[in-house]
Amino acid sequence: MTAAGSPAPPATTDIPVLSVEGLTVRAKRRVLLDDLNLDFPPTSLTAVVGPSGCGKTTLVRSLNRMVELTPGLRVEGVVRYLGQDIYAPAVNPVVVRRRIGMVFQRPTVFPMSVYENAAFGLRIAHEDEETIDRAVNDALRQAGLWDEVRDELDRPALSLSGGQQQRLCIARALAVEPRVLLLDEPTSALDPAATQRVEATMRRLKERYVLVLVTHNVDQAARVSDRIAVLRAGKLVEVGLTADVLERPREKFSEQFIIGRAE
């Protein structure tokens, strides 16, 4: 562990970028996640699917310690980033959330310019102007937004369309150079055209990052993911390559969920 509380680089290159071992999240009278074991390999997109209330959002919020922001929840087990436990006492959760970024269901842009929205995390980190400018331009390109805003970076971010705002949120997360990007139903509030653009962005990004996508939409999972993890009542039902899970599910519940009959 570094002095700043950041996970150190891995000693080997054959470990998953992110993994969970025995992950359990408890509320006062409920178990929200129950003994999950799951790896997220490099340059991949894992779609987490399952019925409403099965623990999908709790899982992704556990992967960067955002679950700690909800009073009354207790986390057990281990979440490893580059082989080290992110819940260890010496680890700074702010650093964790920089390395493991998150994009929420609805775009959360700030009342400032497009440029300053993308630069927000870098400003907090007190990066110099040259670094900020380079990172913002690169992040906007990666998010597929650069060509649409390059000539009006001073434009208020709130004047962008919903899809553009969501891609701006993705750019803001990418600007601080994470290794992992968590996406919690990022297209649920978007129209079909905006959804297509965000999905195209996800397909590009998975070539460079670890992406974890929460979605209710099995068709979306089929379009963008490499792997699917199926949850039910806080338990991991199965996980595997997307084609295998969708075409040859091992578990009856997975089959029922895929065809729209699971409860």
Image (cartoon, rainbow, N blue to C red):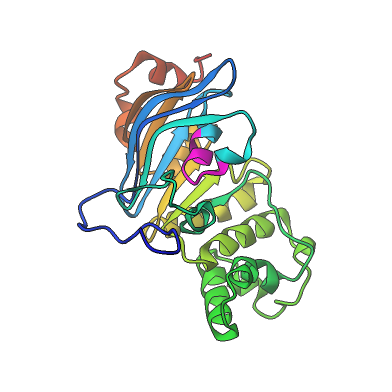
Q: Quadrant of residue 28?
A: top right
- In the visual, does 82 lie left or right of 149? left
Q: Nearer the viewer, residue 22 or 17?
A: 22
Above or below for 34 versus 185: above
The residue sitting at 49% across, 18% down in the picture is: 233
Q: What segment is highlighted magenta in the picture?
A: 59-66
- Tell me if I can see residue 53 in this picture: yes
Q: Is residue 38 above or below residue 10?
A: above
Residue 10 appears left or right of 18: left
Q: Is residue 217 visible?
A: no
Q: Determine which quarter of the picture holds residue 165.
A: bottom right
Q: Residue at x 53, y 75 (%)?
A: 135
Q: Nearer the viewer, residue 94 or 254?
A: 94
- Kindly report the secondary structure that dominates the magenta region of the rendered protein: helix
Q: Furthest-bottom residue in view? A: 130
Residue at screen point 28% across, 48% down: 16
Q: Is residue 157 magenta?
A: no
Q: Position of residue 3 (x, y in %)?
A: 41, 64
- The foreground one among 246 and 155 is 155
Q: Quadrant of residue 212?
A: top left
Q: Position of residue 14 (x, y in %)?
A: 20, 52
> How many numbered marks have been drawn onto this rendered protein structure?
0
**Residue 67 percent across, percent down from the top left:** 56, 38
Q: Position of residue 157 (x, y in %)?
A: 75, 65
Q: Relative to 26, is 149 on the left or the right?
A: right
For the N terminus, the quadrant is bottom left
Give the residue drawn at x 54%, y 56%.
94
Q: Is residue 63 magenta?
A: yes
